[in-house]
Amino acid sequence: MSAPLAPNAKREAFSFAAYKNADVKQRLEVLFHGKCAYCESLYAAQAPVDVEHYRPKAKVDGDDTHPGYWWVAMDWENLLPSCLDCNRRRKQKAPYLVSDLRVLFAEMSSGKQSAFPVAGQRAHPEVSAFDGELALLLDPTRDDPDQHIHFHFADDSGIGLVYPRAIDGMPEALPAISPALDVVAQRARNAGLSARGAVSIQVYGLNRLRLVQERAGIIRRLRFLEELLRDLGDIAQSIDQPQITQAHPIVGVAAGGLRLLQGRILTEMTATAADGAPYSAMARAYLRDFRERAQA
């Protein structure tokens, strides 16, 4: 335990530099496949990785009485690889819906930095477990994001956007845009949405414009491959008829070739959900949706 400070004295700053060592970054890169732990962007091609603390080490935004979670600054389970935009506070374009369901983008600040909002009591220094602390930010290593966020695939109005998970059949809605995270959380609860999903989307900037555009491009590619897969199946089924193939055996061979091509397309779709692929969580969600529609 640390000795108490004299009145008006300041404690000497702790040194937290060891987490920036190259071997730490290398290990995190392997574990997370070179992707940001929050948004799943491949960071290597655009900028160096930030080794980020899920629980901020030196201070907590909005809580001047808390010294930060300095006692877990070097805890391996508190370290995450992050792209610059998810970790550093900066102005971004964030989406909102207007009355005709068009999506517009307004400028706001996002990026985690020292944000760590909680619902209720915050953990005190040197506790060994955080079971009693209700974090409003999703932890990529412990939480199941599917319980709190989902992706929009139904039409182009919200393509590429992340939505807070609706509870008990409530309609989907984008998070409230507010610098006050308690307001974001409360409005989500009032709308029947996951408060943790809504707050995480805003703090991590998961709907910043460039990120939405990248995800939308992958969704459009998956849609194209799905349509191609269905069209080839329809053609193969229409020509692979006994009265046709008996008279023209080459037609049966062609139908078999089309089905092989279907398999290659399905393999290509599945590859977008591989662990090392960017935005693989979204791709897996799309493939689940595709299978459900195919079985309906």
Image (spheres, rainbow, N blue to C red):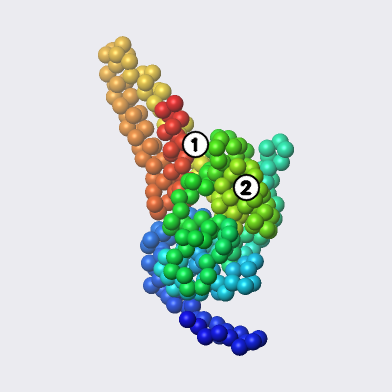
Q: Position of residue 83 (x, y in %)?
A: 52, 62
Q: Which of 186 and 248 is in front in this view?
A: 186
Q: Residue at x 64, y 63 (%)?
A: 90
Compared across the picture, whether 229 is left or right of 260 comes to: right
Q: Where is residue 184 in the image (x, y as percent from the top left)?
A: 65, 52
Q: Position of residue 290 (x, y in %)?
A: 45, 34
One can see residue 201 in this view: no
Q: Which of 11 and 217 is in front in this view?
A: 11
Q: Earlier in the sequence, mark 2 or mark 1?
A: 2
Could you tell me the amino acid type at mark 2?
Ala
Q: Quadrant of residue 258?
A: top left
Could you tell me the amino acid type at mark 1?
Arg
Residue ID for mark 2 = 188
Q: Residue at x 43, y 43 (%)?
A: 284
Compared across the picture, whether 40 is left or right of 249 comes to: right
Q: Distance between the residues labelled 2 and 1?
A: 30 Å
Q: Residues within 10 Å of mark 2 (few under 14, many from 20)?
A: many
Q: Residue furthest top?
A: 243
**Vertical position of residue 37 compared to residue 103: above or below:** below
Q: Which residue is drawn at 29% across and 16% down?
A: 245
Q: What element carries label 1?
A: helix
Q: Nearer the viewer, residue 14 or 88?
A: 14
Residue ID for mark 1 = 223
